Amino acid sequence: MFFRMHWLLGWIQECALSKGGMIRLKLNPLARKKLSRFRSIRRGYWSFIFLLFIYGLSLGAELFVNNKALVVFYEGDLYFPTYADQIGGDRFGLDYSYETNYRELKKQFKESNRGNWVLLPIVPYDPYEMDYQDENATGLSPPNFEKRHFLGTDKTERDVLARLLYGFRIAMTFAIAYLLLTYLIAMGAGSLMGYAGGKADMIGLRFVEIWANVPFLYMVIILVSVMPGWWGVGWQVSSLLLIMVLFSWTGMAYYVRASIYKEKAREYISAAQVIGASPTRIIFRHLLPNVISTLVTFAPFTIAAAISSVTALDFLGYGLPPPTPSWGELLKQGVNNLRIAPWIVISTVTALVVTLTLVTFVGEAVREAFDPKKFSTYE
Amino acid sequence: MQKHKLKTFSILPLFLSLFILTGCDNNQLKPPRDMPPSPEKRESEKNFLTDRESARELAREFAQEFAQEFVRHLKESNSSFALPTAVKPGKKPDFTHSGIVDNDGRPHPLLSHCAEDVLEYYKKHADCFTMATGADIPAGLIWLNGSKEKEFSSPSAKKGGTWQAYMRDFPRTFRTIGPDANGAFRSYLLDHNALGLVHSHPNTDGYYPGLATSWAVGEDGATVFYRLDPNARYSDGKQVRASDYFFFLYFMRNKHVQAPWYNDFYGKDKFKKVTIYNQNTLSITFYKAKPDIVERASIRPKPEHFYSELDGEFLTKYQWKPEPTTGPYVVYPRNVDKGKSVTLVRQKDWWADQKKFFRYRFNPNQIKVSVIRDYNKAFEVFLKGDLDMFGLSKAEFWYGKLPHEHPLVAKGYLTKATFYNQTPPPSYALRINSRQPPMDDLNTRKGFHHAINFDLVLKKVFRGDFVRMNSVADGYGTRSHPSIQAREFSVKKAKSFFAKAGYSKLGPDGILLNALGQKLSVEVLTGYKHFEDVLVVLKEQAKKTGLEIKLKILEPTAAWKAANEKNHQVFFSAFNSSVELFPRFWEPFHSDNAYEEVGNSKYTDDGSLKEGVTTKVSTNNFTQTAVQEIDKLIDLYREEENLARITEMSHQLIEKIHDHAVWVPGWKKPWLRLGYWNWIKFPENWGPKESRNYEEFHVFWIEPKEKQRIINAKKEDKPIATEPSVKIYDRYLAK
């Protein structure tokens, strides 16, 4: 393992099986204390649980918000189209070969009354699908419970709720990946500078200073606009992620470096050195676990920053390639149609505010739980 | 250390030339041009000038000497900048055939102001630039002056006020030619402002005079004679000279303007000859007779006194220096707020102020063009009253954001107007690059046509306001094809064409695969952010046919650059077509605009394209069309003089391009729709028939009193009309 993450795993373990206590990873008493402290801060703790829950929900979004049916019963066979290959309409006796419109299919089955049935998700729309079935629908329809457009539609008649949920999934995954990558680089560079000190530190620090002065937003805008178009959406998103990471690890590297410096001067490190521990062992077994508490307190705020910056980039048109569902794009549509379609902006802003507030609550709680003043072991 | 020295040496020649050039504003004093020094010479120079200090010393000496020489010259020539070979009194000039210079090398009096380089150019192309005398004007010409044509503006127009307009981007240059010059702002400087010799009348097939007072078509049908208006002035007060038309061709053919399209368009093979007869008379000879020759030969003068001559610094030197114009509106540097706005000011005593066809036009005293990057924001600004007019072509605006019931319309502050015009529509189309796989296969292209559901777009996004464009040249009267139809959206047909191209297996995501397992995926590039929903609809619909469309929506300038490099697969854009008698095919479909190899050299014997031909960038052939048959036809078409034959060939070309399937026609709109504050007034019929936008002919005017009244009424929320102010001008509705 790259560094000791067992306390983190244990933490998650505890959240999941807090009452069961079946398998427990070994936790050092300090981490255990921090954890229980975190749990005792109700607001942060429940925010965390709630965030995890909706993220989990969004990961399985295909089961709740999708234009593909969950189950189709046709002529004695059961079909599960959600995660399967695309099923053409001709399979169900329709006159077209492209993907089946399951909402229509449901109606048809009902009318023909031959015992076939379709089970649709709660919101039977895909985030990309334009619901042009209705003759008069030309975009920006208000919320309609009968049609199950719970939050209305956007300007090309796509379901706002579907785009919100899938947008959340992308933004959140993006933010988590961003967090992990940024911290990985920051810890690598920071501990290198901090532990080696001397010339390595001098040169490294100068580099960080220069790098930190490259204007982040401009670089993203420039690099995104020269990205070759033949890259798929996946590639484009991951390169956007990489670009953002490349220009934002520097701040964290400072913290790591400073903490390592501080810890390095402690006696237990000298002791380890005297015993003959290798630098790798010292860094990974002694330094990083002690430094990590500083970093963890920053994590939720980094997530919040990542979500808002990817939303901002989308809003400006430099983020995820269209028509990927994204909050920034929704926000832009909402702002552009503020007077005639307020439901877009209301639901997007609400979702954004709620998410960011929850993340901040978690952040506050973590900060509080990891506050060294409460756990000082010095006499 | 070594490196440092080298650097010093390379700087030396630069230093020297700088010193020399600064003392060299007068063209006549420029020392004869040398070839660039040879490598050996440079080497010896290096050895000679051993360090920076001595080089500086030398340069100083050189400059001093030069300055002394300069002063001596000035004294000798009595403080005037005449040529050393200026006309000696008493001797009658004796001009050779072309008459540019006489036997002693002295320039013709009408060309005495020309720079050495320019004269040299005229001399070199003596067949193209001819001096003649008044006696050479053929007798029996029928001179026309457009006096029978009716004015298309309103006598009730009033001068004054500031028209508040907007642009999406600050202009990248004030040049009207060269890189980045072809932006939206150019129309304020040139297209809708500067005058040509003769203008085609926007309501009839006739012409009305601009800088010329009268004109006549020569016997050959290819030469047009123009009499210049002696009052014609540039905005800097200088007279428009006949020689400015010489200079125009020198300018347009110059490589320093870096505009290959113009280099070609005004090339020698089209504009055969300009002849100056006297101060006010000139003729322009086109390469062949054309039915609309008067219009074709009518070029705009270039102010020679402003440019003098062109060199490699042209682009940078004139980047932010607008040239003097013959039109009413002028950009002064003091009115430019970089990045924010440009205010154009109407000349107080514009020379054409009282001329028929101009007296009731160009009415506002100022045009303030502000940068508003976002279309929707511009709309909000318009609703606030800080923009006077706003195009409401998009259904989203016409129905959604500014419906007839909108308080501003209902209370009579704003008018929504629909004006039916008759012009070739902007060419909204998907341009398929026929060189990029998989679109290099005709079947894929045909399948692509059938996979594009513009009908749904028209119905849903545009709410049935627009109609489908059917061919590459709609809107040219009988020259347009009478029967050809755009290929319709059809899953069946698309799939069968894709199958012919080898894409027959359906992948797990519903996208077709070929035998190699490659996805049928095509990228559509565009700079139109505001048409994103159109493309999104097309993308989702195309999925039904097994085609994946990826969208690449960039900033307008970035998209334009990308498309110019011809690396796109499909480019979605539109070009304004000029109001012409018959369509142009050469620019977008001739192979000479697709590949560097000229003419038939790019084809093998059987007519197919050779391997390894070089793509030609920065041309309008975005489809990379190179079909020998089409080439031949276009060449013939361009040669043809007879309108009936032109019509026939135009039909053939439209069919052939349709068969080549590189151009998916989009939509056209048969009208102009706009919203304007009621202090803006339009003539009775709103505008001329061939108006392409609301600003083209500048026929509107501003009522300042009305403006105050409306602003006050709006403040007090008092309606000034009982019914919504919605107007339809259908006089020119094509039936």
Image: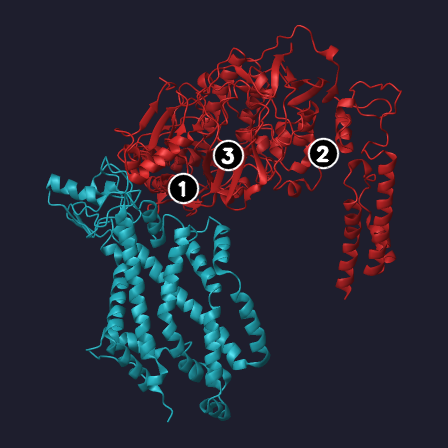
Chain colours: A cyan, B red
What residue did someone put label 2 on? Answer: B308
Q: Work out whether mark 3 precedes mark 2 in sequence or the reverse, and give the earlier one.
A: 2
Q: Is residue B295 above or below residue B174?
A: above
The answer to the question of whether label 3 and label 1 lie on touching residues, with beta carbons closer than 8 A, is no
Label 2, secondary structure: give it.
loop
* Number of other residues with Cα within 10 Å of mark 1, as a class: few under 14, some 14 to 19, many 20 or more: many
Rendered-image quadrant of the C terminus of chain A: bottom left
The answer to the question of whether label 2 and label 1 lie on touching residues, with beta carbons closer than 8 A, is no
Q: Is residue A233 left or right of residue B280?
A: left
Name the subunit of mark 3: B
* Residue B704 x %, y %: 42, 32
Name the subunit of mark 1: B
Q: Residue at x 14, y 42 (%)?
A: A109
The disc label shown at residue B378, or none: 1
Inspect this view and state whether residue B560 appears.
yes
Q: Nearer the viewer, mark 3 or mark 2?
A: 3
Q: Residue at x 69, y 34 (%)?
A: B307
Q: Amino acid at mark 2?
A: Ser
Q: Work out whether mark 2 precedes mark 1 in sequence or the reverse, and give the earlier one.
A: 2
The answer to the question of whether label 3 and label 2 lie on touching residues, with beta carbons closer than 8 A, is no
Q: Residue at x 41, y 56 (%)?
A: A237
What residue did someone put label 3 on? Answer: B366
How many marks can you see?
3
